[in-house]
Amino acid sequence: MSKVGKKLKKNMRDNPYLAAGLVITGMVLLLIIVGLFWTPYEPTAMNAKEKLSGISLRHPMGTDNMGRDVLSRVMYGSRITLFIAMGTVAIGAFAGTIIGAVTGYFGGMLDEVMMRIIDAMFAFPSILLALVIISIFGTGWVQLLVSLGIAFVPSFARIVRGEVLRCRNMDYVENARLQGVSDLRMIFVHILPNIKGVLASAILIGFNNAVLAEAGLSYLGVGSQPPYASLGRMLSDAQQYMFTTPSYVLCPGIVIVLMVLGFAFLGEGISRWK
Amino acid sequence: MTGRSFNRKAVSKLLTIVLATLTIALSGCSSDKTAGDDSSKITIGIPQDISGLDPHNITGAGTKEVLFNVFEGLVKPDENGNLNPAVASDYTISDDSKVYSFTLRDGIRFHDGSAVTAEDIKYSLERNCGLDGSEPLIKSFSNIESVSIVDDSHVDVVLTEGDSDFLTQLTVAIIPKSNQTPDSTPIGTGPYKFVSWSPQESVVMTRFDDYWGEKAFIKDVTFKITSNPDAIVMDLKGGSIDMFPRITSTQAEQLKDEFMIYEGTMNLVQALYINNAEKPFDDVRVRQALCYAINPQEIMDFVSDGAGAEIGSAMFPSYSKYFLPELNDTYNTDTDKAKELLAQAGYQNGFEFTITVPSNYTQHVDTAQVVSEQLKAIGVTANIQEVEWNTWLSDVYTDKNYQATVVGIDASTLSASSLLARYVSDSPKNLVHFNSREYDETYSKAVATADDKEKTEYYKECERILSKEAASVYIQDLPEFVALNRKFTGYVFYPIYVQDIARIRPVEQ
């Protein structure tokens, strides 16, 4: 325990990305965790007298067009955004890693076919793909998660496949093969652990893209359902009040920026971990 | 190092010069413009291009509202919802409502200078009936048995079945028979004549000086297509358009200092439409409880800063002949009463339902959110599901597979039946599955009656039944804002979807 602690301390000192990533992500997580138990106001409570008020002591992030407290809604909304981003990356990384590892390791016809399918999926912008899925299966949490998840599979599959191809011909793999290690064990015990660094930063970058993709989809009105709102949704609702009440659009926007920035730094920091 | 700092200096100098030139040039521009402005021409922004020029073959409301200025029917609607004689100077309706006789207005001319003849009227009406065996262009025209010319100035329209509301259909444009190309050279009898149409850009009209009625004030009118909603405020402030109908309340707020903002209503019946066939809404007490719990005034405060007009039944105020303002007070907000009714119906702990809203209509989505919040007070949980417009049309409007929805329903003609027909229990358009024998009887009496006064009374009775039975939670007629340059005045709202430019006039100085 103390060994890990010491290593973390050393890395924090030498690696500003990690430090900044931890601090920023910590702030956002704190906001979300506090929001689980307490918000200054009920996120859906409306107040006709305080519509579109700017930043004040009563409302640290102002209010929206229905007089709802923006801070409370941001606390609630960042939870949705984080949840969707995590789910998306989990689906994408899991499926993508398996596809990438199998195709990269075995090669041959399977590899050709799978990779052409992946290429075809790459040709579509991921948002477009998600929109198609949502328009067929309707709006809802599950559809949103699955559609974004599928859209994220190709990039993970590509990255993992490349890494597996690189490792496949390395001496230690040859060595293991001579010892008669089975294919499954080879992939999961010998190869995958060696590409965890690349995978970790891919996951964190993917996480950023997922936050932005969810914001994008909600901005198009197919993401989270009112009266609750994800950060992206809030941004989209706020745009028409951009000039009259800038705080309404700025506050959720800043939280999205912080979330993405924090995870980007964290990803960079982890890849530089010594 | 020295080279770099020199460069920087040079760049900043250059920048200053460029900026200075630009400032002078641009300010020159704007002063030129004000000098060249002329109040005898007006440019009106419209959100989409028109779909065609043949008045009988256009469907989009956005096209009809433009061509309203060019074409006229035998009768023409006015801003109070009355039908006034236009191409016909007079008309009589037979007692069985089967024969409509029209007298051609004396001396009326088309835009090309030729006189309107009875032959032209026959041609125009028959063109819509599909008498040659094709599908009629206007569905209700299939009821026309014949259009017969009595003499040079009298035309009889004979119906197969009596219909005392048929006059509302006779606003269809009268066009010259001699015109071989009505889809490219529109010729009508309206206060403006068509000049040119540049697709995706503009439609130009000019005043028709031989108009039979009160002539238009402004000589040249350009409808400019401004499809980007974000550009509307900029275009209005920059002076490239003088008027824009149907701006949002936020845009109105931004423009109110420099522009004349007219506030009217969209002529929609906005309501929380509830599926009467589905539990728990099959119980009238539950529907009434929702009516008591939902406060339309509060919704208007939230959604449009208090603008809009409250309604209490399926009728909007601009149909003043039929509108019953007292129905707004059938259900004044009363949470205790609502809870009591719920308890009587066996839902003392409330219940949960889903409101399906089309996501492209912000005002309906916002209304649903306020409704959901208001219903919390009586322990009812309303979840909101946003769906895309086509999904809404197929699932909710066509298949009626929904619990509740918030939407606005408009009227296709100037008759109360266009709003009330859909509540007849076996009507295919019966969105809420409303089922009341009393209503069906009253409505059929209204349709059968020829006397206008009696008919109106029956329609009013229909509205009272809808209110009493709480067919839906009627909320409001949404507000509509029109921005007009302060050089002009006289904009009027119509109970149908048109822009009457002939009424707009320059402000006298």
Image (spheres, coloured by chain):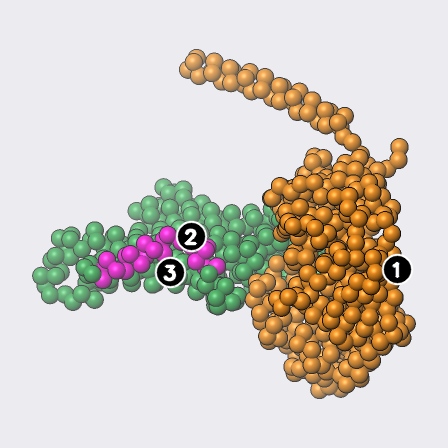
Q: Residues within 10 Å of mark 2 (few under 14, many from 20)?
A: few
Foreground label between 3 and 1: 1
Q: What amino acid is at disc 3?
A: Gly
Q: Residues within 10 Å of mark 3 (few under 14, many from 20)?
A: many
Q: List x then y, in percent, for residue B414.
A: 79, 63
The verdict on a common chain for dots 3 and 1 is no
Which region is colored magenta? Answer: A110-131
Q: List x then y, in percent, for residue B179.
A: 68, 49
- What residue sits 66% from the left and 82% below the top? B277
The secondary structure type at the circle numbered 1 is strand
How far apart are labels 2 and 1 at the CA level?
A: 63 Å
Residue found at the far right of this picture = B453
Image quadrant in which you'd find residue B77: bottom right
The verdict on a common chain for dots 2 and 3 is yes
- Of the chain colours in the picture, the one used for chain A is green
The secondary structure type at the circle numbered 3 is helix
The residue singled out by tag 3 in the image is A92
- What residue sits 87% from the left and 63% below the top? B91
- Residue B461 shows in this picture: no
Q: Is residue A117 magenta?
A: yes
Q: Residues within 10 Å of mark 1 (few under 14, many from 20)?
A: some
Disc marking residue A125: 2
Task: Give the answer, above or below, for where B145 lies relative to B297.
Answer: below
The residue singled out by tag 1 in the image is B90
How far apart are labels 3 and 1 at the CA level?
A: 73 Å
Left/right placement of residue B144 relative to residue B184 reads right
Q: List x then y, in percent, for residue B343.
A: 74, 84
Q: Earlier in the sequence, mark 2 or mark 3?
A: 3
Quick check: marks 3 and 1 in contact, CB under 8 Å?
Answer: no
- Residue B87 shows in this picture: yes
Task: Give the answer, above or below, for where B407 lies relative to B499.
Answer: below
